[in-house]
Each structure stands twice: as structure tokens, then as C-alpha cells.
Image: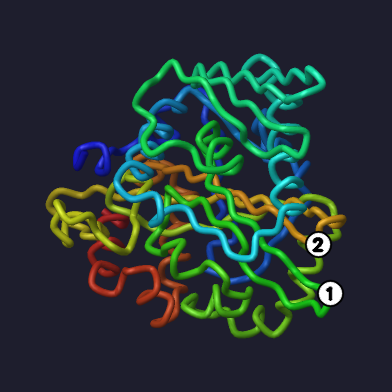
């Protein structure tokens, strides 16, 4: 179990078909909404897709299965997640998967139930006409615990984490569902039920954005789908950095972010975040697809290297604390400048 929880995944450079992003083009570390139309061209074939699936699917899935097995409640939470929102989210996921990847996902409606054939996992998921999970068939017998909802089962078919934000008639908003098996030092249990402002309170530099929280949530819900990027630095390519270490793993090993200039391992951890509104349900789905880029390769490109150095140097003291770089900043900059 512990070895699966510590599993690392391939970098973009090691992969043949991973989408490649570099969200530091202006050479500054900035906190801003940065929402762009989903069909913005970044020179990747999958740029306009909600879900990006590639040849690393199996290792990403292994991380999800290990997280669920260790403690499902650490990684999956719901709060005031009403049936209409749950139905809209499940319908959206299935719709996009069958449109974007018809070679992997096929949906049959026999009048009594909806049957989704998932070729990547060799699973068959059965739903009623309201997209509630009825049952499933597995080729892989290692699913534990059993899938407990449509969202839980569907999240296991993709390489993204999935979150849902809901809103009521008074414009109050809250995180209503979080399936987060690739957490970057935050947990589903801490964020579930929180509104946009409280979810982002720990993020340094969010003050101005939080003043516009309701307008941003409204944009997520009523406007066309958008994409944004977030990034940080990591000393490993482990997707699961839940703030609470598993009992069998030492805290220091689990935490990471321990840069050793004599044995340098450094990666850009990039999150591609897609916001897809569900206005009829007064909600929005938010996906996070995580990629790693090897800073050894970035160092070889003079332009990219200087943008990374400049972005690190531009971080405020609070941002350095939030990103876990206070102790390692100078060593990282010295290594990058070698």
C-alpha cells in the first residue's frame, strides 16, 4: 500500500503524448483568475477538451485507486450536493467522454438504464435515467472500497480531479463535491462546504480576487467553459501530496519539497484547471489535470530558464511560504543559474 501511495508519474518530457504547458510566459509569479476560453490554442491536440487522457493513464489511475483504498473519505467529500446537480455533473462527464474519446467510451441507453463501456479500465458502469449509479462490472478486481456514487465511479475513469461548486438563489456558494486524489498540499475535508473566499484564504495574494468572489463564481456558472493554469515547484513527481501523511509513511518523506542542491531533483507542477458551467443547475464543475515538467530540461532552454528564475525571484515572502520554498529558494536559484 505505501509503495502505491508514493508512486511517481512520468514527466511531460518523458511522455510521447502529454500536453505541454508553460504558464510562466511573462516571467512573473501572479495570482489572478486568468480564465481563457477553453478553445484557446496552446499547440496541443487536446487543448479544447475537458478531459485530457494520454498514455500515462494507468499510472494516474493507480494513484487514484491507492488513495481510495487508503481512506476514501480523505479524498472524496460531498456537502449539500443535491440530486439535480449530481445528475448534471454525471451527465456532463459522460457526455464529454463519449464525444472526446469515442474510442474509449461508449454509452448505450436500453430504455431502462444507461450503460457506459469504459475501455481504458475495462469497466462497465450502469446508471438509471437520472444518471445515478446502479451497479458496475469490473475486469480489475482490485477496486476497494466499492464505488459509492456516479461521481466516484466516473472520476476513476479520468486523469483529472473533479470538484463542484454550487450556488443558491441568494448567490451564496459552496464546494458541494470534491473528488481529489491528486491533492497539492490541501485536502477535500478542509475545503468541502466552504465558499470561494474561504477555500482560497490560505493562498497568498488572493485578497483582491476574493473581493470579486461572487462575480467570479457567476462567470464560472453562466459563461462558456474556460481554462486557467496554476504552477508550483516540486522535488518529486508524486500526484498525491495530501497534507495528512498515511500512518505508515514518515511526514518528511511524504511532504516532499526538500530540494538538495547536491542531488538536484526539481519539477514544475502544473495544473490545468477547467471551469465548465451548469447554469440550469446553478453550479459549475471544476477539473484539475496535473502535469510535471523536468527543470533539468527547462534549464537547457535559455529563455524558459530565465523566465522560471524571474518568476521565482518575483515571489513575495507570503507566496514563498505558501509554496513551501522559503528554505530552498536560494539553493534552487543557484542550481538554475549553474
CB under 8 Å between discs 1 and 2: yes
Residue 126: quarter of image: top right
The location of residue 47, given as percent across then percent down, is 68, 37
**Disc 2, SS:** loop
Rounded to the nearest angstrom, the CA distance separating label 1 from label 2 is 9 Å
Residue 337 horizontal side relative to residue 302, left or right: left
Outermost residue to the front: 112
Q: Earlier in the sequence, mark 1 or mark 2?
A: 1
Q: Which mark is residue 160?
A: none
Neighbours of disc 2 within 10 Å: few (<14), some (14-19), many (20+): many
Q: How is the image coloured?
A: rainbow
Between 183 and 256, the one nearer to me in the picture: 183
Residue 318 vertical placement versus 298 (above, below): below
Instruction: Determine the residue positioned at 62% across, 75% down.
Output: 195
**Disc 1, SS:** loop
Instruction: Determine the residue positioned at 48% across, 22% down.
Output: 55
Identify residue for label 1. Answer: 169
Instruction: Determine the residue positioned at 72% across, 27% down.
Output: 100
Identify residue for label 2. Answer: 282
Between 314 and 39, the one nearer to me in the picture: 39
Residue 293 vertical placement versus 331 (above, below): above
Between 128 and 334, the one nearer to me in the picture: 128
Between 65 and 224, the one nearer to me in the picture: 65
Quadrant for the N terminus in the image? top left
Neighbours of disc 1 within 10 Å: few (<14), some (14-19), many (20+): few
The location of residue 278, given as percent across then percent down, is 80, 53
Amino acid at each position: 500500500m505505501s509503495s502505491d501511495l508514493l508512486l511517481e508519474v512520468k514527466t511531460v518530457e518523458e511522455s510521447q503524448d502529454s500536453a505541454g504547458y508553460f504558464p510562466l510566459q511573462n516571467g512573473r509569479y501572479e495570482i489572478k483568475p486568468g480564465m481563457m476560453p477553453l478553445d484557446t490554442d496552446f499547440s496541443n491536440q487536446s487543448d479544447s477538451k475537458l478531459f485530457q487522457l494520454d498514455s500515462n493513464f494507468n499510472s494516474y489511475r493507480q494513484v487514484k485507486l491507492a488513495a481510495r483504498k487508503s481512506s476514501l473519505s480523505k479524498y472524496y467529500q460531498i456537502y449539500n450536493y443535491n440530486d439535480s446537480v449530481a445528475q448534471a455533473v454525471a451527465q456532463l462527464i459522460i457526455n464529454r467522454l463519449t464525444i472526446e474519446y469515442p474510442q474509449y467510451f461508449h454509452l448505450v441507453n436500453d430504455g431502462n438504464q444507461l450503460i457506459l463501456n469504459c475501455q481504458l479500465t475495462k469497466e462497465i458502469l450502469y446508471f438509471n435515467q437520472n444518471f445515478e449509479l446502479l451497479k458496475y462490472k469490473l475486469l480489475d478486481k482490485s477496486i476497494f472500497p466499492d464505488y459509492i456514487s456516479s461521481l466516484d465511479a466516473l472520476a476513476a475513469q479520468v486523469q483529472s480531479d473533479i470538484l463542484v461548486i454550487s450556488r443558491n438563489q441568494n448567490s451564496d456558494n459552496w464546494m458541494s463535491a470534491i473528488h481529489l486524489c491528486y491533492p497539492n498540499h490541501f485536502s477535500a475535508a478542509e475545503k468541502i462546504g466552504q465558499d470561494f473566499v474561504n477555500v482560497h484564504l490560505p493562498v497568498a495574494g488572493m485578497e483582491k480576487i476574493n473581493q470579486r468572489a461572487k462575480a467570479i463564481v457567476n462567470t464560472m456558472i453562466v459563461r462558456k467553459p474556460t481554462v486557467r493554469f496554476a504552477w508550483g515547484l516540486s522535488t518529486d513527481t508524486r500526484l498525491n501530496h495530501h497534507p495528512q501523511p498515511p500512518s505508515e509513511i514518515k511526514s518528511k518523506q511524504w511532504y516532499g519539497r526538500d530540494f538538495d542542491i547536491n542531488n538536484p531533483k526539481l519539477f514544475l507542477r502544473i495544473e490545468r484547471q477547467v471551469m465548465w458551467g451548469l447554469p440550469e443547475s446553478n453550479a459549475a464543475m471544476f477539473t484539475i489535470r496535473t502535469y510535471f515538467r523536468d527543470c533539468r530540461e527547462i534549464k537547457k532552454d535559455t529563455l524558459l530558464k530565465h523566465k522560471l528564475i524571474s518568476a521565482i525571484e518575483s515571489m513575495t515572502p507570503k507566496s514563498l511560504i505558501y509554496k513551501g520554498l522559503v528554505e530552498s529558494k536560494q539553493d534552487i536559484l543557484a542550481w538554475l543559474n549553474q
